[in-house]
Amino acid sequence: MLQQYQIYKVEICGGGKYRDADAGAIVVMNVNSGEVLAMASFPDYEPSSYVGGISQETLNFYYADENNRPLVNRAINGAYAPGSTFKMVTAIAALQEGEVTTKEKVNDTGVYPRGHKPACWYYRQYKRGHGYLDITDAIKKSCNFFFYEMGYRVGIERLDKYATAFGLGQKTGIEIRSESAGSLASPEYLMKTRNETWTVRTNTKCFNRSRR
């Protein structure tokens, strides 16, 4: 019974569908201290290949996989959108700035009406919205609709401030070479990289993809 309930929880949070991955990374941390307990990057390579000098044949084999690049440590050098983990930043920003309370409920009707009108993952999968959710339930169910609304209320300038305060878009300082800093979305960054002005449509696209 417990196992069935755990499977159900994964399904209602959007984890019921998955695809095989050719590459990826995982980091296990102590949430209290930030200590890295384990780190892995895939695909990997055989470290013993370098003992005594790596052969050209083996090196060519590693470099030949241009798509998956096994010599790249994705855990610290890959810059990826964080997906729904960024909702924690949005939630804290909205609460701290007084844009939402812990008791207010937002009605997820499935398709968010602003910007490019993105749909919540729940709507795409089940053709209906989550209904009325407070911020706690929105986090539990990873409700995209709720956090589109929070992102709209907070605005990109204040959201960027909180993301920066959490260290996003910066190097962590981990004692491993070749760490990537990643990037944060902002009106200035958009103008610099794409020569575009930030709009509500940009908001929903940005919050839909999230960022590192």
Image (cartoon, rainbow, N blue to C red):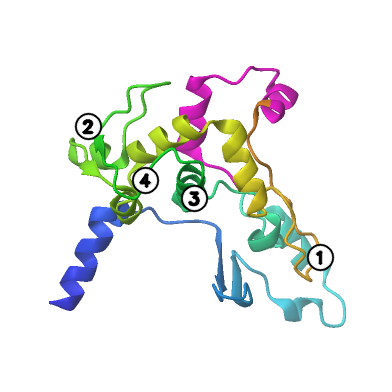
Whether residue 190 appears in magenta in the rendering, the answer is yes
Question: Which numbered marker is on residue 101?
Answer: 4
Pointer 3 and pointer 4: residues touching (CB < 8 Å)? no
Pointer 4 and pointer 1: residues touching (CB < 8 Å)? no
- Name the residue rendered at 47%, 42% in the picture: 94
Query: Is residue 173 placed above or below 2 in the rendered structure?
Result: above
Q: Position of residue 97 (x, y in %)?
A: 51, 41
Give SS at disc 4.
loop
Question: Which numbered marker is on residue 130?
Answer: none
Give SS at disc 3.
helix
Choose the circle earlier in sequence order: 4 or 1: 4
How dense is the environment of label 3, judged by Cα within 10 Å: few (below 14), some, or many (20 and up)? some
Choose the circle earlier in sequence order: 3 or 2: 3
Which mark is in front, 4 or 2?
4
Write down the region rendered in magenta.
188-212
Amino acid bearing label 4: Thr
Choose the circle earlier in sequence order: 1 or 3: 3
Give SS at disc 1.
loop
